[in-house]
Image: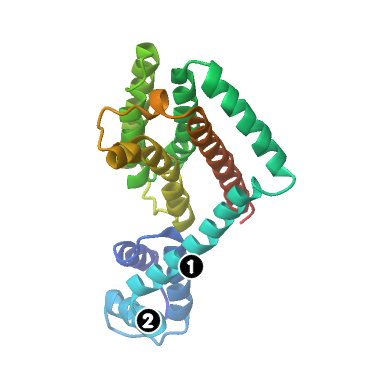
Amino acid sequence: MNITPQEHQDIKKILWHKIDYCETFDEVYDHVLTALEHYPQTSLPIENVVAQIVKDDFGDISDVEFKRVRMVRRQISMRFWQYMRGYFKFPLIMFTILAGLLGLYVAEYIPRNITYITVIAATAVPVIVIGLHCLKKGEFYPTTVASIGFLMSFGFKTSYHTFSRIFWICTIFMTALILLKVIYSKKFVKASVKDRITADLSFVGVGLLCVFILLPMLILGDRQFNYIKQAHTAMVAIMLICHVVYCMSFLKLYRDEFKMQMVS
């Protein structure tokens, strides 16, 4: 079956509205073009032919994408937690021990607000990395915007008001840039499964922060409890180490995923 340039565009439009991720879109689009080359000439509309090919060869596209997301999420999550566990095995455990001792010193002798800012920074770095990735590719990830919102609320709690204002301005500016890039992008962009799942993992640091800051309030039944100022030195050091290890593990994951995408 001969395909005209206009039909090429029509096929893309048909598949665009049925598929969420670029990996699936590329796979299905290439498969449909190959199948059409061997398809007998027909008077049926191209929409019907494409729908029939997709149904016969792929079945339910949403089910195909669900399985792909589940598989990729499992692979990336296993790699991420492998990096995390690596900091508690030799030889990286030596770094963790030294960082833990440094965390104890900082929590004991350095103003606690400095520790809090360090934790916020370790949480913010993955979110910033994904935010810049969003700007570059013109993609939108709800978890990234949610992470920015949480960090804005946590960042405002420090008594260093200049830091709070700068943090708020930067996060609002980044969110606005992401949304504008997505809305006014000159080309249509399908989200990547790998990028989406990596963006979801950037929310883990915010989750850790919520556990350390908010959970003690619920357990103690005291809404005025301030974890940074009132918790034991060892607990503050543990929070600091968890966020630093998380941040470094995420950066390793992102570096590896970026290299893989560059190679592919």
Q: Quadrant of the N terminus?
A: bottom left
Of residues 229 and 185, the one nearer the viewer is: 229
- Percent across and percent down for residue 136 are 46, 39
Of residues 70 and 14, the one nearer the viewer is: 70
In the rendered view, tell whether residue 175 sits above or below residue 23: above
Quarter of the rendering containing residue 221: top left
Q: Amino acid at mark 2?
A: Ile
Name the residue tied to disc 2. 53
Q: Amino acid at mark 1?
A: Met
Instruction: Please give the name of the residue rendered at 44% of the width and 66% of the height, measured from the top-left corner.
Output: 70
Q: Residues within 10 Å of mark 2 (few under 14, many from 20)?
A: some
Name the residue tied to disc 1. 71
Quote the CA–CA distance across marks 2 and 1: 24 Å
Q: Nearer the viewer, mark 2 or mark 1?
A: 1
Instruction: Please give the name of the residue rendered at 39% of the width and 64% of the height, measured from the top-left corner.
Output: 5
Of the image marks 2 and 1, the number of the one nearer the N terminus: 2
Residue projecting furthest to the bottom = 40
- Percent across and percent down for residue 186 are 36, 42
